[in-house]
Structure formats: C-alpha cells, structure tokens
Image: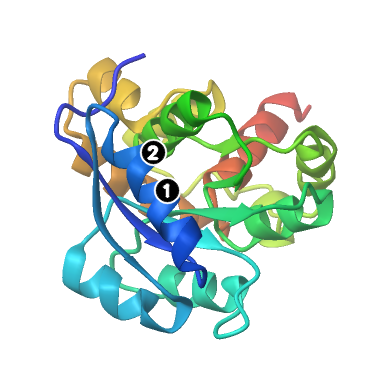
Amino acid sequence: MPYDLRPVRVLVVDDEELVRTALQQVLGSADGVTVVGACDGPDAVGAVRDLGPDLVLLDIDMPSAPGFDVLRALRALPRPPAVAMLTALDTADHVERALREGASGFLLKTTEPRIFVEAVRLLAAGGVVCTPSGSAEALSRYAVPVPEPALGAPDALDHLTAREREVLTLIAAGLSNADIAAHLGMGVTTVKTHIGALKRKLSVGSRVALATVAHRSAAAP
C-alpha cells in the first residue's frame, strides 16, 4: 500500500508517562514514522501548533483534559492534523462519538505493535482505522445520523466541482489521500484541500461521513 515518502510525523497525547514512553518506543523503531513529541492533554493544542504533526494519537480518558474536549480544540485549528483516539476499553459508543466529532480513527492501546504501526501509517495517509471489535457495529450506527443538510437537500452535490466529485467518488471507494493523488495526477496537499472543501459544502466532519454521503447519493433513485 503506497504512503507518502516522507516520514509520518506523530504526536502522542496521554496523561500517563508510561504510555507515552511505550508508544514512542514502538513508533520510534518503525521505518517511516517519526514521533515529534509527547505531552499531556492540556499541552496538546500548543504542541500541534509548535510541532506540526501529521497525526495525533489522543487518549480519551485524561483527567487533566478529557480527550473529546481536546479533539474538538484540535479540529478547530486552521490546519488540523488527523487524530486517532486511544483507549484501553473496547467501547462501541466511544468509537461512534469519535468518528462523529471528526476523528480519523480509534485505536486500542493493546493493539499488537506491528498492526498499530501500520494503522498509524494508514491514518496519516488519509485513511480511517478502527481497531476495536465493536467498530463494525459503531460504523453501521454512525452511517445513519449524518447531518441532514448533506443528505436531505436534493441538490447537495450540485454545488461540487467536477474535481471534487472525482475525489468524493475515490474516498467512497476507500482510497487513501496518496492513492487519490496518484490516480488523479495531483499532489497530496491538493487532495487535502479538496477534502476540506467537500466537508464544508456537505456539512460533515469526517472522511467516513463523506463516504456515507457518496454511497447514499449513488443509491438514491
């Protein structure tokens, strides 16, 4: 599976130093991955601004700064990184909430290191990854309450450019940003710009929601 050639820049956000150290060791030993920093929840926004990571691994259960509060703050940044929520609990409700609020993934801390590293690479490339066993149930439920402005208005897709429609179709097909860029002959940064425009025009907050809109549009009579 192709990924960007430059190293994936990862920021680890967790309130437990032991977890931060363990993840730094796992990811630091992997080819093509660079851990640019590790911090507690209250320092996450500042660290993202200073370090410019491609991906933030964000713990959900942090007494100092609840993970979902931090997620919302990160998503509000002018150029938000991809965010994957971390937890030790396999909870379908948490998976659904994470995706609804704009996270790109949901990873269990107990995931086998090799799979964890591959998930990080895919997330940084623009993919969506959820490792808990409850993910399928959560994703099926999540596909229902996509905001009505995107699905209810019959002309919702009419405002898209031809290129945006092509990008949306490839997102629905499961391609990563790098794959879309290669397929359409453009840079990954340009793909990300189109995805941002799609989210604004279709009033959705995540890649999963974009795919849902595309699939429902294709299935509509």
> What percent of the width, then of the height, locates residue 169?
49, 26
| Image position of 214 (left or right of 36) | right
Task: Tell me the crowding category of disc 2: few under 14, some 14 to 19, or many 20 or more residues within 10 angstroms, Cα based.
Answer: some
Q: With 190 as the anchor, is 1 left or right in this view?
A: right
**Tag 1 secondary structure:** helix
Q: Residue tagged by mark 2? A: 26
As displayed, is residue 164 above or below residue 24? above
User: Which sits in the foreground, 206 or 44?
Assistant: 44
The kind of residue tagged 2 is: Val
Identify which residue is drawn at 45% across, 67% down: 17
Residue 201: assigned label:
none
Where's residue 175, x and y in %? 44, 23
Viewer-side residue, 215 vs 129 = 129
Point 59% across, 50% down: residue? 156
Amino acid of disc 1: Leu
Task: Report which residue position mark 1 lands on.
Answer: 23
Colour mapping used in the image: rainbow
Q: How busy is the neighbourhood of tag 1: few (under 14 within 10 Å), some, or many (20 plus)?
A: many
Q: Quadrant of the N terminus?
A: top left
Tag 2–tag 1 contact (CB < 8 Å):
yes
**Whole-number angstrom distance, CA of label 2 to CA of label 1:** 5 Å
Q: Who is closer to the viewer here, 143 or 114?
A: 114
Q: Quadrant of residue 68?
A: bottom right
For residue 66, say whether it is visible: yes
Note whether 9 is above or below 26 in the view shown: below
Residue 184: percent from the left, percent from the top? 26, 21
Measuring 78% from the left and 27% from the top, which residue is drawn there?
Answer: 221
